[in-house]
Image (spheres, helix red, strand yellow):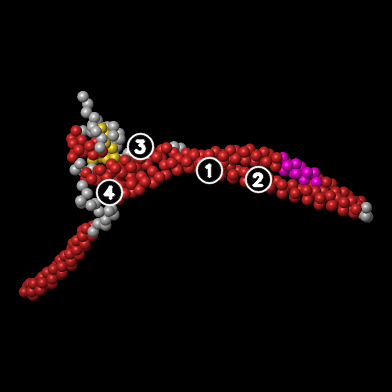
Amino acid sequence: MIKAKVKAKESAKPVANSKIEKAKKTESKPAKKETAKAKIEYAEPAKPKAKHKEINPDVTIEERLKALFNLQQIDTAIDKIRIVRGELPLEVQDLEDEIIGLETRVKNYTDEVNVFEDTIVQKKQQMKDSLSLIKKYEEQQNKVRNNREFDSLTKEIEFQNLEIQLSEKRIKEAKANIAAKNEFVEKVQAELDERKSDLKHKKAELDDIIKETEKEEKSLMKQSGKAEEIMDERLLTAYKRLRTNARNGLAVVTVSRDACGGCFNNIPPQRQMDIRMRKKIIVCEYCGRILVDQELAGVEELVEA
């Protein structure tokens, strides 16, 4: 009996060992899949898509800074031309909007007057109908057979007389409203004519200014477009963002008297040396504008005695 139990235990050990080995194999398989997935996921970001134009390696930082400064000079000249127009474009737009509003008011008043006139016509027709009914009832009174019919006809005649009085009242009210609305229309029309005259003069003045500066502005716009073609898209986007955020439209400024030409904050000597080296594009720590030295900008540096 003891020998049989020992043999049974020995025969059971290989079965248990085989189950453990199978479990280990099944546990080890997903690990391989996970590592493979990890490799795939790690490999996916290695294919970035180029969103911007490639930077030409032949163009140096100094050349890019010169192109940026030239572009800034051209855009500043365009801004000055547009400043000459002043508030005229906005004034013209405001006058056009005001004229549209006044024309709408005149139309509304005119529509209301037409409604009151239709009411007068309608009430006059009702008065005619009431008068014809009164005549009819009076003729019928002469042919009545008893007092009940006579009394009913008399009440109908009284009712039609009341309808005539009510129609006359409504006609008077409508005429008063028409007079008031016509007065409003006259005032608004006078104001509208005045605004149209102002708009005509303002447009003529604006057209004259545009004609004087149109050729110069077009040539500057062409120069600006050519200057933009030299730069890569990322640098150009940063330049335009700086211009829109700056009040004076300056995105590229010079260092003058140890200070930023945009916000006038002091710039450390080491940073000024980096700017003169022109090895990288440096921006102001305070306002974010791109900084260039005065020699690159073609400005003679003032030396204090």
Q: Residue furthest left?
A: 3
Q: Nearer the viewer, mark 4 or mark 2?
A: 4
Q: Disc 3 designates what residue?
A: 248
Q: Disc 4 designates what residue?
A: 231
Quarter of the image containing the N terminus? bottom left
Label 2: how many residues lie within 10 Å, few (<14), some (14-19) or many (20+)?
A: some
Q: Nearer the viewer, mark 3 or mark 2?
A: 3
Q: Secondary structure at mark 3?
A: loop
Residue at 87% in and 49% down:
154
Quarter of the image containing the C terminus? top left
Q: Which of the 4 image quarters holds residue 18?
A: bottom left
Amino acid on which disc 4 is placed: Met
Amino acid on which disc 2 is placed: Thr
Left or right: 36 with respect to 148? left
Q: Which of the 4 image quarters holds residue 25?
A: bottom left
Label 4: how many residues lie within 10 Å, few (<14), some (14-19) or many (20+)?
A: many
State which tag comes first along the sequence, 2 or 1.
1
Label 3: how many residues lie within 10 Å, few (<14), some (14-19) or many (20+)?
A: few
Q: How many marks?
A: 4
